[in-house]
Image (tube, rainbow, N blue to C red):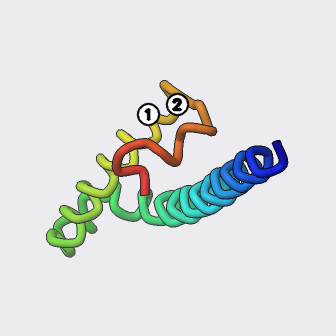
Amino acid sequence: MKGKLRNETKGWETKLNNMSELIEEVSKCQKTWMYLEPIFASDDIHKQMPTEGSWFRDVDTLWKLTMDAIDNDPGIIDLIERENIK
């Protein structure tokens, strides 16, 4: 029984550490997105920096899709196992 409990505990420890890292990364991305989103919302910026504006649009779309997916299925325990979450 000790070995099984130890293995199960290690599994949960790994899962919790991975979730913690993912939450930290999502938080960092959110802070950066919140800073950049109002800047790139400006049409003037898109005219001055069309390539960067296009990149931001792509990232913005991916960010919103990812956040919508998390909002629709907020199960935090399985979040780390979702495809392309990292």
1 lies left or right of 56: right
In the foreground, 11 or 15: 11
Residue plotted at (62% across, 38% down): 76
* The image quarter in which residue 18 lies: bottom right
Residue type of the residue flagged with mark 2: Asp
Tell me the residue that label 1 is attached to. Answer: 68
State the CA–CA distance, disc 2 to disc 1: 5 Å
Residue at image point 24% right, 55% down:
58
| Residue indicated by mark 2 | 71
| Left or right relative to 17: residue 55 | left
Q: Is 48 located above or below residue 42 in the figure?
A: below
Q: Which residue is outermost to the top?
A: 72
Q: Nearer the viewer, residue 63 or 38?
A: 63
Q: Can you tell which mark lies on residue 7?
A: none
Q: Where, by quadrant of the figure, is residue 10 drawn?
A: bottom right
Where residue 8 sits in the image (x, y, percent)?
72, 46
The kind of residue on which mark 1 rests is Asp
CB within 8 Å, label 2 to label 1: yes
Residue at image position (84%, 48%) is: 2
Q: Residue furthest right?
A: 2
Q: What percent of the width, then of the height, locates residue 63?
A: 39, 49
> Percent position (x, y) of residue 61?
29, 47
In the picture, which quadrant includes the N terminus? top right
Q: Nearer the viewer, residue 17 or 62?
A: 17
Above or below 46: residue 5: above
Disc 2 residue crowd, few under 14, some 14–19, many 20+, Cα 10 Å = few
SS type, badge 1: helix
Check disc 1: other Cα within 10 Å, few if <14, some if 14-19, many if 20+: few
